[in-house]
Image (cartoon, grey):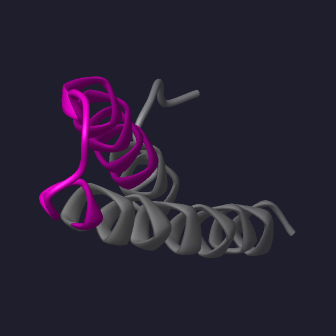
Amino acid sequence: MIAAMRIIGALCLLPVAAFCVFGFLATYEPIEGGALGWRVGYGAGIVTCTCAALRLLLKGGRSR
């Protein structure tokens, strides 16, 4: 049961990470104003979602 919940949680995080990847790439199109804030936000989203999904899948954390 817990393994299934970990897989479902990771599968929910991966589309969010993919959305952040596309958003990050879109900030490199020429726009008016600074896009640095968007790049940092999307980059943080990519790293956070990917690390959380990997931690769920690889059983990171304390052993009981």
Residue in the image at 24% along x and 35% along y? 35
Residue in the image at 20% along x and 66% along y? 25
Residue 8 rendering spot, x and y as whole percentages: 73, 73
Residue in the image at 46% along x and 44% along y? 52
User: What is the quadrant of residue 40 in the picture?
Assistant: top left
Classified by dominant secondary structure, the portion drawn in magenta counts as: helix
Residue 19 rendering spot, x and y as whole percentages: 48, 68
Which is more toward the observer, 52 or 32? Answer: 32
Residue 47 rendering spot, x and y as whole percentages: 28, 42
| Horizontal side of residue 8 vs 40, given as left or right | right
User: What is the quadrant of residue 30 in the picture?
Assistant: bottom left
Residue 41 inside the magenta-drawn segment: yes
| Horizontal side of residue 54 vs 8, given as left or right | left
Residue 33 rendering spot, x and y as whole percentages: 25, 30
Above or below residue 43? Residue 44 is: above
Which is more toward the observer, 42 or 46? Answer: 42
User: What is the quadrant of residue 39 in the picture?
Assistant: top left
Q: Quadrant of the C terminus?
A: top right
Q: Residue furthest right?
A: 1
Q: Quadrant of the N terminus?
A: bottom right
Which is more toward the observer, 38 or 29? Answer: 29
Residue 17 inside the magenta-drawn segment: no
- Number of marks drawn: 0
| Horizontal side of residue 3 vs 43, given as left or right | right
Residue in the image at 47% along x and 24% along y? 62
Magenta residues, as a range? 26-50
